Amino acid sequence: MYNPGFMKEKLYKESIALLQKLIATQSFSGEENLTAEILMNYLSTYCEKIHRKGNNIWVKNKHFDSSKPTILLNSHHDTVKPNKGYKKDPFQPEMLDGKLYGLGSNDAGGCLVSLIAAFLYFNDKRDLSYNLVLVASAEEESSGEKGIRSVLSDLPEIDFAIVGEPTSLNLAIAEKGLLVLDCYAHGTPGHAAHSKGDNSIYHAMEAINWFKGYHFPEISETLGEVKMTVTQIEAGDQHNVVPSTCHFVVDIRVTDKYSNLEVLEKVKSAVKVEVKERSLRLNSSFIPKEHPIVQAGIKLGRETYGSPTLSDQSNLTCHSLKLGPGDSLRSHTADEFIYIQEIEEGISLYIQLLEEIL
């Protein structure tokens, strides 16, 4: 006889062991081959057909029915490189005082193994209202071309997604997009003693003042204002030569009120410098508060909020909810960790949430 309590306990124990294996295996963004193998080997104990493209792994639930809508469950198995502040071995999964230490434990290993457990909990069930597709993606940290974007065309049509990122198990119903601009102010080079005012640095200053002072009129209920920040600037190499060009970089966090293209067009019409965008694809994302999955989360006592940090949500065109165990403030920090209890709570919440709609 099927025992849900036993299954949850089994999956919880396996999730901790799986996360320990992932931590112990280097998986810098773009170098996830070994963790992809680990995930394939684990999933093969439950699933007959597992798909792989590059280092992205995905699988459909056992009784997938193409006539039904599909929910995407996604998290990533790549990590950033450990920063210089580490005192512990980043690849040693150490359990201490209720915490599991190691690179990628919080971002986003705990979310990934919890989502996998939730997927497997429902994998054999018949007569679900939705199909489930699990994707363990690569190159999330680098927003790489060989990450989840490379497999979206291979997946069935997605109705909505749950993206596993550390949110303290609250509901991130909106996420800011990212637009990075390289700006070039041009002037007339010459000797500083004879400069006639056509100074590229002064032209850059005018544009920078616009970025500093302009406010986009539409304000998002969950994400607030579009935020524009000048983060880098460079010009000249001699004290007595007026530089021909001043280059500066602008980091723009875009809300769900605007597309990246709309923001870019406004910038280009407002500043008198050359503007080159690095990418337009990392758009903001949102899911209506009235959506059944959000309402299910609220019913379970979870709070909604808007997230300022970027995830694989930016690559999805469907509605998506960001949710997972762990705390985003721990991501990319030295001696990264996740509480063991958070993983157990994450598995439980994912299952409860899906039970509300499946």
Image (spheres, rainbow, N blue to C red):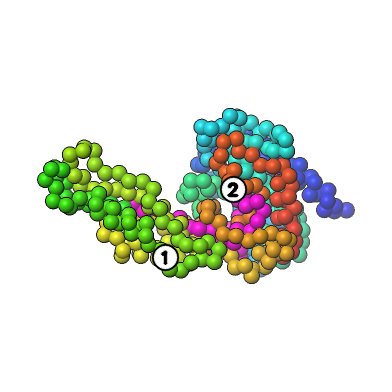
Residue furthest to the right in view is 1
Kindly identify the amino acid type of the residue bearing the numbered disc 1: Phe
Kindly identify the amino acid type of the residue bearing the numbered disc 2: Ser
- What residue appears at the point 41 percent right and 56 percent down from the top-left corner? 228
Give, as a single range, the part of the protein colored magenta. 153-182
Q: Earlier in the sequence, mark 1 or mark 2?
A: 1
Question: Can you give x and y, in whole percent of width and height, for residue 107 in the image?
Answer: 59, 44
Of 75 and 252, nearer the camera is 252
Question: Can you give x and y, in whole percent of width and height, for residue 202 in the image?
Answer: 24, 52
Please tell me in which quadrant of the rendered image residue 286 appears: bottom right
Of 212 and 298, nearer the camera is 212
In the picture provided, is 177 more to the left or to the right than 71?
A: left
Give the residue at mark 2.
328
Give the residue at mark 1.
216
Circle 1 sits in a helix, a strand or a loop, which is it? loop
Q: How far apart are marks 1 and 2 (CA)?
A: 27 Å
Query: Can I make out residue 238 in this image?
Result: yes
Of 206 and 74, nearer the camera is 206
In the picture provided, is 195 more to the left or to the right than 166?
A: left
Residue furthest to the bottom in view is 290
